[in-house]
Amino acid sequence: DADVTQTPRNRITKTGKRIMLECSQTKGHDRMYWYRQDPGLGLRLIYYSFDVKDINKGEISDGYSVSRQAQAKFSLSLESAIPNQTALYFCATSGYGQPQHFGDGTRLSIL
Amino acid sequence: DQQVKQNSPSLSVQEGRISILNCDYTNSMFDYFLWYKKYPAEGPTFLISISSIKDKNEDGRFTVFLNKSAKHLSLHIVPSQPGDSAVYFCAASANYGQNFVFGPGTRLSVLP
């Protein structure tokens, strides 16, 4: 079983819809992250959480929100999706000072 | 302005030869650097790291070199194998393992 699981793997939806992407991990890490990947821009940090009661904005948090339901679960929401949020989304986890472990991504298309 | 740059979007190398992937950064506070490899339809996987107290780190066929004065690091793969064909991301952190800034990636193709 994967250490970091993202659901769904693919999603097509319409502008204005609310979308939730979910992430769960079995690595026991306190730190969890959400990134988006766009061609030519690499991975950009949306939100991160260093423990259950800690939520922080990343580089590109506008239009997104997150919830850390438990140590193992971190979800990303798009309250009202817009086409420029079409991207590949990755969840990651890490321990302190450790490299991040990534899920396999969610490909989101907003029409 | 990108703080971590990988100026070569793609690189092709013959099997058995050396692959050299380059990364430049602008923030002098970065003190921890990582390379990730990404295959299609998978998430990035950690490959090798280096802290600013070192100028070289080796792990099997992979070696990372850090030149702090030039704000430049490179990943050497010797010998290159077809299975190394992937996108390689360079990432940097200013607080030794706090948040990482990623470069745009370089697509490596190793030709048989």
Image (tube, rainbow, N blue to C red):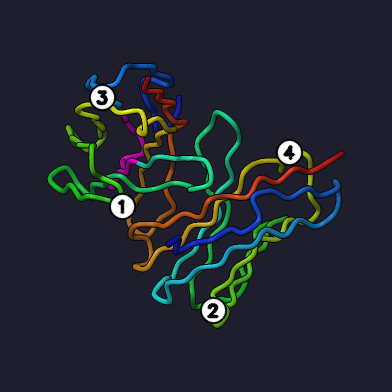
Which residue corresponds to mark 3? A20
Q: Residue furthest left?
A: A53
- Residue in the picture at 45% in, 40% down: A37
Q: Which residues are magenta?
A: A23-34
Q: Of the residues shown, which amino acid type is indicated by label 3?
A: Met
* Neighbourhood count class around disc 1 (C-alpha, 10 Å): few under 14, some 14–19, many 20 upward: few
* Distance Cα–Cα, label 4 vs label 3: 34 Å
Is A31 in the magenta?
yes
Determine the secondary structure under disc 4.
helix
Q: Quadrant of residue A63?
A: top left
Do the residues at discs 4 and 2 belong to one chain?
yes
Q: Of the residues shown, which amino acid type is indicated by label 2?
A: Lys
Q: Which mark is residue A59?
A: 1
* Neighbourhood count class around disc 3 (C-alpha, 10 Å): few under 14, some 14–19, many 20 upward: some
Do the residues at discs 4 and 3 belong to one chain?
no
Give the chain letter at badge 4.
B
